[in-house]
Image (tube, rainbow, N blue to C red):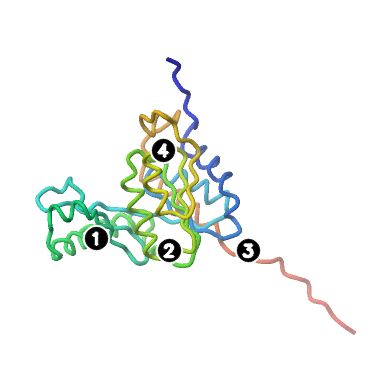
Amino acid sequence: MVQQQPEFQDRLEAGRTLGAALTHLAAAHPLVLALPRGGVPVAFEVARALDAEMDLLFVRKLGAPGHEELGIGAVVDGADPQLVLNEDIVRQLAPSPNYIRAEMRRQLAEIDRRRRSYVGSRVAAEVTGRTVIVVDDGIATGGTVKAAVMGLGKNHPARLVLAIPVAPRDSLAEIAPECDEVVCLTQPEPFYAVGAHYVVFDQTTDEEVIRLVREARAFGRPRRLPARAPSFRG
Protein backbone atom coordinates (compact mmCIF):
# COMPACT_ATOMS: atom_id res chain seq x y z
CA MET A 1 0.00 0.00 0.00
CA VAL A 2 1.49 3.34 -1.11
CA GLN A 3 1.18 6.07 1.49
CA GLN A 4 -0.13 9.32 0.04
CA GLN A 5 2.05 12.38 0.55
CA PRO A 6 0.49 15.44 2.23
CA GLU A 7 -0.75 18.03 -0.27
CA PHE A 8 0.14 21.07 1.85
CA GLN A 9 3.27 22.09 3.72
CA ASP A 10 1.25 24.04 6.29
CA ARG A 11 -1.91 26.13 6.68
CA LEU A 12 -0.35 29.21 5.08
CA GLU A 13 0.55 27.28 1.93
CA ALA A 14 -2.95 25.80 1.82
CA GLY A 15 -4.34 29.33 2.07
CA ARG A 16 -2.19 30.58 -0.80
CA THR A 17 -3.34 27.70 -3.00
CA LEU A 18 -6.94 28.28 -1.98
CA GLY A 19 -6.62 32.02 -2.62
CA ALA A 20 -5.46 31.31 -6.18
CA ALA A 21 -8.62 29.24 -6.72
CA LEU A 22 -10.83 32.12 -5.53
CA THR A 23 -9.53 35.01 -7.62
CA HIS A 24 -12.79 35.09 -9.58
CA LEU A 25 -14.40 36.54 -6.44
CA ALA A 26 -11.95 39.42 -5.93
CA ALA A 27 -14.04 41.92 -7.89
CA ALA A 28 -16.95 41.39 -5.48
CA HIS A 29 -14.85 42.79 -2.58
CA PRO A 30 -15.73 39.77 -0.42
CA LEU A 31 -15.64 39.35 3.33
CA VAL A 32 -13.44 36.43 4.39
CA LEU A 33 -14.57 34.77 7.63
CA ALA A 34 -12.12 32.48 9.42
CA LEU A 35 -13.17 29.74 11.82
CA PRO A 36 -10.66 29.99 14.69
CA ARG A 37 -8.17 28.88 15.40
CA GLY A 38 -6.98 26.60 12.60
CA GLY A 39 -8.87 28.41 9.88
CA VAL A 40 -7.19 31.74 10.57
CA PRO A 41 -3.83 31.18 8.80
CA VAL A 42 -5.66 29.74 5.79
CA ALA A 43 -8.12 32.65 5.68
CA PHE A 44 -5.30 35.16 6.09
CA GLU A 45 -3.68 34.05 2.84
CA VAL A 46 -7.06 33.98 1.08
CA ALA A 47 -7.75 37.54 2.23
CA ARG A 48 -4.29 38.61 1.11
CA ALA A 49 -4.78 37.06 -2.35
CA LEU A 50 -8.15 38.78 -2.81
CA ASP A 51 -7.23 41.99 -0.95
CA ALA A 52 -10.36 41.32 1.08
CA GLU A 53 -11.54 42.22 4.56
CA MET A 54 -11.06 39.39 7.07
CA ASP A 55 -12.90 38.71 10.31
CA LEU A 56 -13.36 35.79 12.68
CA LEU A 57 -16.47 33.62 12.83
CA PHE A 58 -17.21 31.88 16.13
CA VAL A 59 -19.57 28.91 16.44
CA ARG A 60 -20.52 27.51 19.84
CA LYS A 61 -22.41 24.29 20.49
CA LEU A 62 -25.56 24.41 22.64
CA GLY A 63 -25.45 21.53 25.09
CA ALA A 64 -28.47 19.41 25.98
CA PRO A 65 -29.95 19.67 29.49
CA GLY A 66 -27.83 17.52 31.79
CA HIS A 67 -25.68 16.33 28.86
CA GLU A 68 -23.60 19.27 27.68
CA GLU A 69 -21.49 17.07 25.41
CA LEU A 70 -24.61 16.38 23.30
CA GLY A 71 -25.33 19.29 20.99
CA ILE A 72 -28.93 20.39 20.45
CA GLY A 73 -27.74 23.09 18.08
CA ALA A 74 -25.28 25.95 17.79
CA VAL A 75 -25.12 29.70 17.98
CA VAL A 76 -23.29 31.47 15.17
CA ASP A 77 -21.43 34.70 15.84
CA GLY A 78 -21.91 37.90 13.87
CA ALA A 79 -23.38 41.38 13.86
CA ASP A 80 -26.73 39.55 14.15
CA PRO A 81 -26.01 36.20 15.91
CA GLN A 82 -28.12 33.26 14.77
CA LEU A 83 -29.40 30.11 16.43
CA VAL A 84 -29.21 26.86 14.46
CA LEU A 85 -31.05 23.94 16.08
CA ASN A 86 -30.70 20.23 15.40
CA GLU A 87 -34.41 19.60 14.94
CA ASP A 88 -34.15 15.81 15.32
CA ILE A 89 -32.44 16.03 18.71
CA VAL A 90 -34.70 18.88 19.87
CA ARG A 91 -37.76 16.74 19.07
CA GLN A 92 -36.32 13.81 21.03
CA LEU A 93 -35.21 15.77 24.12
CA ALA A 94 -37.82 18.56 24.06
CA PRO A 95 -35.74 21.18 25.91
CA SER A 96 -37.86 24.12 27.07
CA PRO A 97 -37.70 27.45 25.20
CA ASN A 98 -36.39 29.01 28.41
CA TYR A 99 -33.52 26.51 28.53
CA ILE A 100 -32.62 27.17 24.89
CA ARG A 101 -32.63 30.95 25.43
CA ALA A 102 -30.49 30.64 28.56
CA GLU A 103 -28.01 28.30 26.85
CA MET A 104 -27.82 30.65 23.87
CA ARG A 105 -27.07 33.60 26.17
CA ARG A 106 -24.36 31.57 27.90
CA GLN A 107 -22.67 30.65 24.65
CA LEU A 108 -22.95 34.19 23.29
CA ALA A 109 -21.17 35.41 26.42
CA GLU A 110 -18.36 32.94 25.73
CA ILE A 111 -18.21 34.07 22.09
CA ASP A 112 -17.96 37.68 23.24
CA ARG A 113 -15.13 36.75 25.62
CA ARG A 114 -13.21 34.95 22.90
CA ARG A 115 -13.80 37.68 20.31
CA ARG A 116 -12.49 40.33 22.70
CA SER A 117 -9.40 38.26 23.45
CA TYR A 118 -8.57 38.16 19.73
CA VAL A 119 -9.82 41.45 18.28
CA GLY A 120 -10.50 43.69 21.27
CA SER A 121 -13.55 45.92 20.98
CA ARG A 122 -13.86 45.54 17.21
CA VAL A 123 -17.44 44.56 16.32
CA ALA A 124 -18.28 41.66 14.02
CA ALA A 125 -18.42 42.52 10.32
CA GLU A 126 -21.83 42.86 8.66
CA VAL A 127 -22.58 40.08 6.16
CA THR A 128 -25.97 41.14 4.77
CA GLY A 129 -25.76 41.89 1.06
CA ARG A 130 -22.09 40.92 0.80
CA THR A 131 -20.17 38.10 -0.83
CA VAL A 132 -18.97 36.06 2.14
CA ILE A 133 -16.25 33.38 2.05
CA VAL A 134 -16.13 30.99 5.01
CA VAL A 135 -12.69 29.41 5.49
CA ASP A 136 -11.39 26.60 7.69
CA ASP A 137 -8.28 24.41 7.50
CA GLY A 138 -10.37 21.37 6.61
CA ILE A 139 -13.52 19.43 7.38
CA ALA A 140 -13.91 16.09 9.13
CA THR A 141 -17.54 15.53 10.15
CA GLY A 142 -18.54 19.05 9.10
CA GLY A 143 -20.85 19.84 12.02
CA THR A 144 -19.28 23.18 12.91
CA VAL A 145 -18.96 24.35 9.32
CA LYS A 146 -22.54 23.35 8.50
CA ALA A 147 -23.83 25.31 11.49
CA ALA A 148 -21.69 28.27 10.43
CA VAL A 149 -23.04 28.48 6.88
CA MET A 150 -26.63 27.82 7.99
CA GLY A 151 -26.39 30.64 10.53
CA LEU A 152 -24.79 33.02 8.05
CA GLY A 153 -27.46 32.21 5.47
CA LYS A 154 -30.11 33.59 7.84
CA ASN A 155 -28.40 36.99 7.58
CA HIS A 156 -28.89 37.10 3.80
CA PRO A 157 -25.43 37.49 2.27
CA ALA A 158 -25.47 38.24 -1.45
CA ARG A 159 -23.38 35.12 -2.05
CA LEU A 160 -22.18 32.51 0.45
CA VAL A 161 -19.02 30.61 -0.46
CA LEU A 162 -17.36 27.80 1.49
CA ALA A 163 -13.61 27.53 0.82
CA ILE A 164 -11.54 24.74 2.34
CA PRO A 165 -8.34 22.90 1.45
CA VAL A 166 -9.54 19.37 2.22
CA ALA A 167 -12.75 17.52 3.11
CA PRO A 168 -14.37 14.10 2.70
CA ARG A 169 -16.93 13.93 -0.08
CA ASP A 170 -19.82 12.79 2.09
CA SER A 171 -19.43 15.65 4.59
CA LEU A 172 -19.10 18.15 1.77
CA ALA A 173 -22.23 16.81 0.10
CA GLU A 174 -24.23 17.54 3.27
CA ILE A 175 -22.99 21.12 3.50
CA ALA A 176 -23.04 22.12 -0.17
CA PRO A 177 -26.82 22.76 -0.38
CA GLU A 178 -26.43 25.52 2.23
CA CYS A 179 -23.92 27.42 0.05
CA ASP A 180 -23.98 29.23 -3.27
CA GLU A 181 -20.52 27.89 -4.11
CA VAL A 182 -18.07 25.41 -2.61
CA VAL A 183 -14.35 25.45 -3.40
CA CYS A 184 -12.46 22.45 -2.01
CA LEU A 185 -8.94 21.71 -3.23
CA THR A 186 -8.95 17.99 -2.51
CA GLN A 187 -11.58 15.40 -1.55
CA PRO A 188 -9.59 12.24 -0.77
CA GLU A 189 -11.14 8.79 -0.56
CA PRO A 190 -10.72 7.22 1.87
CA PHE A 191 -10.52 10.15 4.28
CA TYR A 192 -8.77 9.69 7.62
CA ALA A 193 -8.01 13.07 9.19
CA VAL A 194 -7.49 16.69 8.18
CA GLY A 195 -3.98 16.71 9.65
CA ALA A 196 -2.88 13.86 7.37
CA HIS A 197 -2.92 16.30 4.45
CA TYR A 198 -0.43 18.73 6.01
CA VAL A 199 3.28 18.24 6.58
CA VAL A 200 3.08 20.67 9.50
CA PHE A 201 -0.22 20.68 11.41
CA ASP A 202 0.70 22.16 14.77
CA GLN A 203 -2.04 23.74 16.83
CA THR A 204 -2.59 27.38 15.90
CA THR A 205 -1.82 29.51 18.95
CA ASP A 206 -3.79 32.44 20.33
CA GLU A 207 -0.77 34.65 19.68
CA GLU A 208 -0.71 33.65 16.01
CA VAL A 209 -4.42 34.40 15.64
CA ILE A 210 -4.00 37.84 17.22
CA ARG A 211 -1.01 38.65 14.98
CA LEU A 212 -2.69 37.55 11.75
CA VAL A 213 -5.92 39.39 12.57
CA ARG A 214 -3.89 42.54 13.19
CA GLU A 215 -1.91 42.17 9.95
CA ALA A 216 -5.08 41.44 7.96
CA ARG A 217 -6.45 44.89 8.78
CA ALA A 218 -4.33 46.17 5.89
CA PHE A 219 -6.42 44.14 3.43
CA GLY A 220 -9.61 45.32 1.77
CA ARG A 221 -9.18 49.00 2.52
CA PRO A 222 -10.15 51.61 -0.08
CA ARG A 223 -7.08 52.75 -1.98
CA ARG A 224 -6.52 56.46 -2.23
CA LEU A 225 -5.75 57.75 -5.69
CA PRO A 226 -2.53 59.74 -6.03
CA ALA A 227 -3.14 63.44 -5.60
CA ARG A 228 -3.25 65.28 -8.90
CA ALA A 229 -1.16 68.38 -9.30
CA PRO A 230 -3.35 71.50 -9.55
CA SER A 231 -3.73 72.95 -13.01
CA PHE A 232 -3.71 76.66 -13.63
CA ARG A 233 -5.38 78.37 -16.49
CA GLY A 234 -4.25 81.75 -17.67
Q: Are marks 4 and 1 in contact (CB under 8 Å)?
A: no
Where does label 3 land, which residue? 223
Give me the residue at 29% from left, 60% from top: 112
Q: Residues within 10 Å of mark 1 (few under 14, many from 20)?
A: few
Q: Residues within 10 Å of mark 2 (few under 14, many from 20)?
A: some
Which of these two is toward me, 73 or 88?
A: 88
Where does label 1 land, which residue? 109
- CA distance separating discs 2 and 1: 18 Å
* Amino acid identity at mark 3: Arg
Looking at the image, is mark 3 or mark 1 earlier in the sequence? 1
Q: Secondary structure at mark 1?
A: helix
Front disc: 2 or 4: 4
Where does label 2 land, which residue? 125
Give me the residue at 76% from left, 71% from top: 228
Q: Residues within 10 Å of mark 3 (few under 14, many from 20)?
A: few
Front disc: 3 or 4: 4
* Amino acid identity at mark 2: Ala
Q: Are marks 3 and 1 in contact (CB under 8 Å)?
A: no
